[in-house]
């Protein structure tokens, strides 16, 4: 049985996923060992049940990120904070320096101060912009994370190393023995 692998992109630039694609020919080997069940590179709309490993790129910036992250944690055995935004908040967390209520300030700056046309802050629930959290968080502030893979982005060699490690080891999670590989 193949390992069920997911990758997720929260608030970030997608550089970590680009680095993942830099695994080049290892991706062919990986395809024989894993089933990619959710990722921005596949057309799956709902995060599935019973995921073995999930690489999470990006910081937790808005309600949609937080809701998805809680669903991921409930449905996944091993979470990897994938890249500096997931590990520390990095660039997305720069808005935290604006102080309390900064979500309003950020929206004002983006949609009013810097807009040439249609100067209007999107209303909550209008489907344009998810409701921003009061502050951006690294993934581990919202849910438990088993592994951290820093880098902006992490190198393909480091991504390969952690995936190879997980695929070649047995981990005891949630009271069950799970064999990766």
Image (cartoon, helix red, strand yellow):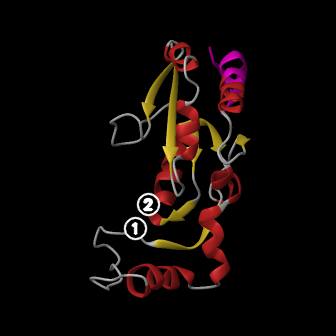
Q: Is residue 86 visible?
A: yes
- Is residue 53 in view from this perspective? no
Residue at image point 50% right, 34% down: 6
The picture places residue 154, in percent across and down from the top left corner, at 68, 40
Left or right relative to 141: residue 61: left
Which disc number belongs to residue 103? none
Q: Quadrant of residue 24?
A: top right
Camera-nearest residue between 73 and 175: 73
Which residue is disc 1 drawn over?
130
Residue lying at 47% horizontally and 83% vertically, measured from the top left: 109
User: For residue 155: magenta?
Assistant: no
Q: Which mark is residue 64?
A: 2
Q: Residue at x 62, y 14 (%)?
A: 181
> x, y percentage for residue 95?
60, 74
Within 10 angstroms of label 2, few (less than 14), some, or many (20 or more) residues? some
Q: Is residue 122 above or below residue 29?
A: below
Query: Which residues are the magenta region?
Result: 164-181
Are there few (<14), some (14-19), or many (20+) residues within 10 Å of tag 1?
A: some
């Amino acid at each position: 049985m193949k390992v069920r692998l997911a990758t997720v992109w929260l608030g970030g630039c997608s550089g970590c996923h680009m680095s993942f694609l830099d695994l080049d020919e290892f991706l062919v080997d990986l395809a024989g060992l894993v089933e990619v069940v959710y990722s921005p590179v596949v057309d799956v709309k709902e995060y599935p049940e019973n995921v073995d490993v999930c690489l999470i790129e990006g910081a937790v910036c808005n309600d949609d990120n937080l809701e998805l992250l809680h669903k991921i944690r409930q449905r996944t055995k091993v979470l990897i904070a994938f890249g500096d935004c997931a590990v520390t908040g990095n660039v997305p967390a720069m808005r935290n320096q604006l102080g309390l209520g900064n979500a309003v300030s950020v929206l004002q700056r983006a949609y009013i101060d810097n807009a040439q046309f249609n100067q209007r802050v999107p209303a909550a629930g209008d489907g344009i912009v998810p409701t921003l959290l009061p502050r951006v968080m690294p993934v581990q502030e919202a849910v438990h994370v088993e592994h951290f893979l820093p880098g902006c982005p992490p190198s393909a060699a480091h991504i390969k190393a952690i995936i190879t490690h997980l695929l070649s080891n047995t981990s005891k999670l949630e009271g069950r023995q799970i064999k990766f590989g």
